[in-house]
Image (cartoon, helix red, strand yellow):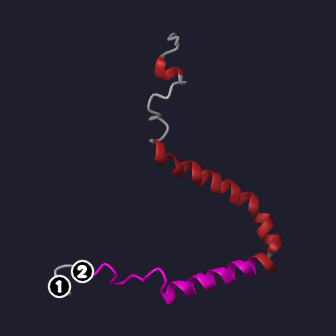
Amino acid sequence: MSDSPHPSPTRGRSRPGSPVRLGILVVVLAIVIYLLTAHWLHVADALPYVFVAAMLVMHLFGHGGHGGHGGHGGHGGDLQERGAGDVR
């Protein structure tokens, strides 16, 4: 335990330009380049599944910005919001 009452915010974290982060980035980039050059056919075969999975994930987690499916904030259009017989 530390003697100071306020723990250091950088303790245990690497800075954005640290050599560890740069090394991890270089290794990940090398792996991606290797997969794209040596195994292009396998990557190309998996692309349709990656796109479908990406669409599912974006749909599930992308609705947080506007309040989900129920909170459109009175932007009109829906029959449920204004009633079936209401004419504007």
User: What residue appears at the point 61 percent right and 51 percent down from the top-left corner?
Assistant: 56
Give the left or right position of residue 28, taking residue 5 as reference: right
- Label 2 sits on a secondary structure element that is loop
The image shows residue 36 at horizontal and vertical percentages of 77, 75
Q: Label 1 to label 2, Cα distance in Å?
A: 7 Å
Give the left or right position of residue 7, taking residue 15 as reference: left
Residue 67 vs residue 39, the one in the foreground: 67
The residue wearing badge 1 is 4
Give the left or right position of residue 41, taking residue 54 as reference: right
User: What residue appears at the point 47 percent right and 23 percent down from the top-left corner?
Assistant: 81
* Number of the label disc, if any, that sits on residue 7: 2
Look at the image and give the residue range highlighted in magenta.
7-35
Numbered marks: total: 2
Residue 34 inside the magenta-drawn segment: yes
Amino acid of disc 1: Ser
In the image, is residue 19 above or below residue 82? below
The image shows residue 3 at horizontal and vertical percentages of 16, 88
- Label 1 sits on a secondary structure element that is loop
User: What residue appears at the point 64 percent right and 52 percent down from the top-left corner?
Assistant: 55
Amino acid of disc 2: Pro
Residue 85 vs residue 60, the one in the foreground: 85
In which quarter of the view is residue 67 placed? top left
Asked if marks 1 and 2 touch (Cβ < 8 Å), the reply is: yes
Give the left or right position of residue 51, taking residue 41 as reference: left
User: What residue appears at the point 47 percent right and 47 percent down from the top-left corner?
Assistant: 65
